[in-house]
Amino acid sequence: MGFEYLLYVTIGYVALAKHAGNSVGLLCRAELPKGSGDLDSLFLSSDSIQRYFYKLHDGKGLNELYAVLGADKLATMADLRMAWRVRDLEFATEPTNPASRACERAYNILAHPELRSCYDAIRQDEDAAPVFPYGGFGSILVEGNLSDDGEAFFGNHILAYKPEMTSRKLSVLLRRCNFLADRVTCVDARRKIEIHFDSCLLGGLQWDLTWNHWKHWLQSRIVVNATFVRTGKYRYRKGEWILRTWLTALPSRLRVTLPEGLQADVERAKAIHALLGEHGEVVAKIRDEAEKQPIERTQVQDWFDRLGASSHLKPQHATWRPDYEPYYFEQLRRRSTTWFLFRDEYLFEWANVLISEIPQPGHATYVFAKPVDVPAFMRQYSCATREDIRRNRDNIATELGFVGRVIRGRKKRRWLNDVLKLAGEKADYMEVFE
């Protein structure tokens, strides 16, 4: 080791602490981007990470994170947010106060389940290996030593750290969240984001684990304004370790706007779930019949009416699946004169065409010229598969009047525009092109 140096550098993922020898102790290796000069590696001591992130000064001296935030050690996620809101109000007139920054850092540690577990372990055992918050990815200023060959830097004291941050406003479907005991978690693989909501953010909404059984009936969206930090973790895939990165919302800078009628939507979803169970025998018969041949929705509705079922129970619910997307179904239904249930599909009769839709990721929309004899079409269609139609086996596509299919992408309105074109219908500007 040589003299003490200061190093300011951009880092990537910071690995978990490992023992580097009796004389050195636990070290965390921070990945460095290409173009960092002769420096190949940055190693941060376990103690330096603990001091900077987990042992904070609140302006009066070293203190526990719970004390800095003003929260109890057994506080729930909602309790932590309430404590943070109170402290944030206290510092509103002096945002540059060092204690304000320490308080926000404490909250962002305690409000993240994994980091809170890490901190609680450190409280019990100071030799416990710390986790670098949110995986690294940011700019860091450290004091330490340069190795003899000049290729590695050993950081003994973190002076400053700023994570990569980006602000976004987005809409989140509640049915795509996971309802856990103390929080609601949104993990969106397509957008590569992760958000944790507590009951304070969700207007005091009270949920339990059973919500995961019927959440697919929820229609509500919540609007989220958040500051995201980049995070990541290595995953073992196909014989190699691959770094997967995503964006995690900082709890302290998370704002949520709830829609009107959220509670009513929850009650409606619960009611549908209960009604399907209450009338399970009839629903099972409908599903069995729909496996054999298309059933018109008026017939299903008549069966429900005879049972005296609630108006919450609709014909489509009989064959609806948890990962179906209501948007595609509703756009086709509202333009149809009538529609049918068939296996995992819905068949919609329009003015000029007949449309087959499986409102599920990975499926396309099939469009046919409107048949003169609809019952005959249904009988013939029920004997074919979608692959038969694509390949025109035994001339089935021609006989059914197959016009084409629309493959769904990320933009729903582009899908709707393409379907309307195939159907020979005029697109509504506000609805399709806005």
Image (spheres, helix red, strand yellow):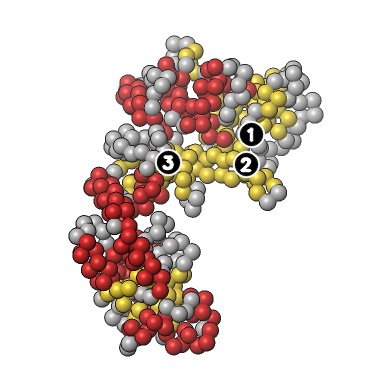
Please name whichever residue, 254 or 233, is drawn nearer the observer in this view of the structure.
Answer: 233
Between residue 387 and residue 243, name the one nearer to us. Answer: 387
User: In terms of secondary structure, where does tag 1 sit?
Assistant: loop
Q: Circle 1 sits on which residue?
A: 15
Instruction: Name the quarter where the N terminus is drawn.
Output: top right
Mark yes or no: residue 201 visible.
no
Between circles 2 and 3, the one closer to the viewer is 3
User: Looking at the image, which residue is at 27% across and 74% down?
Assistant: 338
User: Gap in Å between the C-alphas at discs 1 and 3?
Assistant: 24 Å
Residue sitting at x 62%, y 41%: 234
Q: Residue furthest right?
A: 149
Residue displayed at 44% across by 39% down:
249
Tag 3: residue type? Thr
Relative vertical location of residue 103 with respect to residue 427 in this rendering, above or below: above
Instruction: Give the labeled residue for mark 3.
Output: 185
On residue 205, the disc is none
Q: Residue furthest front?
A: 281
Q: Tell me where residue 79 sits by quadrant.
A: top left
Q: Give percent across and percent down for residue 385.
A: 48, 76
For the residues labelled 2 and 1, say whether their Cβ atoms are less than 8 Å apart. Answer: yes
Q: Nearer the viewer, mark 1 or mark 3?
A: 3
Find residue 21 and report its horizontal and vertical position in percent: 75, 22
Q: Earlier in the sequence, mark 1 or mark 3?
A: 1
Could you tell which of marks 2 and 1 lies nearer the N-terminus? 1
Sort mark 1 into few (<14), some (14-19) or many (20+) by Cα contacts within 10 Å.
many
Q: Amino acid at mark 1?
A: Ala
Give the tally of numbered discs.
3
Identity of the residue drawn at 76% across and 29% down? 150
Identify residue for label 2: 234
Q: Is residue 313 left or right of residue 404?
A: left
